[in-house]
Amino acid sequence: MPDFLLPDLGEGLTEAEIVRWLVEVGDGIEVDQPVVEVETAKVAVEVPAPFAGTVITRHGEPGQTLAVGTPLITVQPPGGFTEPGVVTAGKGSGNVLIGYGTPGRPARRRRRGTTAVADRPAPPRNARPAVISPLVRKIARDNGVNLAGITGTGPGGIIRRADVEAVLIARTETVTGDRDRRIPLRGLRKTVADKLSTSRREIPEATVWVDADATELLAARAALNAKCPERPVSLLSLLARFTIAGLRRYPELNSRVEGDAIVVLGAVHLGFAAQTSRGLVVPVVSDADRLSTRELAEAIGARTAAAREGTLAPSRLTGGTFTVNNYGVFGVDGSAAIINHPEAAILGIGRITERPWVTGGQVVARKVCQLTLAFDHRVCDGGTAGGFLRFIADCVESPLIALGDL
């Protein structure tokens, strides 16, 4: 019988944990039908089969971790074998993950037995907790978590693993005194920890910063949104637009070090830091240098929402060439951010607060923020880094002039 192997789930992801099976042994499946939901260190995804047939064996149970390339299910094909161990795939098949899509044939969700997750209605009040994952139930049961007291953040109010883990984190943070806490480094937390450690170990970084008057930036954003309220722009999208312009002038910062060479990259794949219930992630807007300001705002908004829902495809979390970070949302002024390896720099903006500012020889109240750039000192010197940051600050202080030239 042919085996369907767990596919490559994206750059750097070598294993996945089974969350729930979407098919039973004996079920007939179609091309591109989701057969299992798995959770990686970055996202939860539904994996579709690339061929049709009857499920003979499911290799693994909910909660079990499988390595990429190991058997996921064994399927008896409806039309027989073309050669030993090989199944004839349905025409046009080639789907790897939900959202990647087979040309001309969208992936279908399973409708047998239970309603598809995306279409499941919100549970009525006083109904049983909306939990469909055995793994989520097990985690809650093992840790004494009452599922009835949790509001699910999944589609239709479904309680996800991240919802239960958030309760556990909040619970452990209340422990005081001499009781130690042990928090395992696993999943997304481990992935982030490994990447940050690699950055600190391999990149000789330096940091420069400057205060900027953001009064006109706030006014420009308000004017843009008043003109087209159905397509609003965010401060982060404006900062992203300025960043792309700055990288055109200082391309060394859109690069990476490979061996004994500096590779200056032609396209700008812009990453931005986003805090989610599962931890910090960095979604990427590919070819951001080809987008308008409003298109950037829409792309950033859509990826942020998907990241927080846990539905962002792995391909949207890799391949960045430069990262921007709005840490001002945490109420802080500045940050010596860690570069997102293997990128060469990260730009950050702190909170915008009213401060005394000298304008035209007079001290007046203005909206001021701090801009920070951490950069790989191997790819450029302080002159280049300072020039880039000064350019961004000038854009922040005179956004209408800057946007007119971008």
Image (cartoon, rainbow, N blue to C red):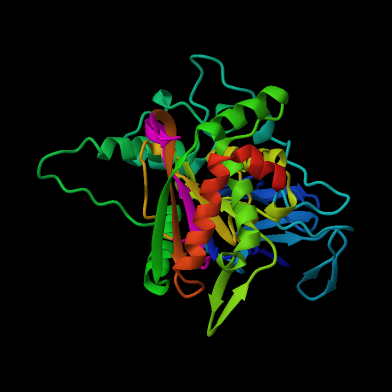
Q: Relative to residue 222, is residue 182 depicted above or below? A: below
* In the image, farthest residue toward the bottom: 260
Describe residue 75's horizontal placement relative to residue 253 as left or right.
right
The answer to which image quadrant residue 78 occupies is bottom right
Q: Which residues are magenta?
A: 339-363
Q: Name the residue at 49% across, 63% down.
A: 385
* In the image, farthest residue toward the top: 125
Residue 17 in sight here: no
Describe residue 271's horizontal placement relative to residue 327 as left or right.
right
Residue 127 in sight here: yes
Residue 364 location in percent, x, y? 40, 28
Most foreground residue, 80 or 219: 219
Q: Name the residue at 46% across, 49% down.
A: 348
On whether residue 233 falls in the magenta region, the answer is no
Residue 65 location in percent, x, y? 49, 59
Q: Name the residue at 56% across, 16% down.
A: 124
Residue 167 location in percent, x, y? 36, 35
Q: Relative to residue 109, is residue 264 depicted above or below? A: below
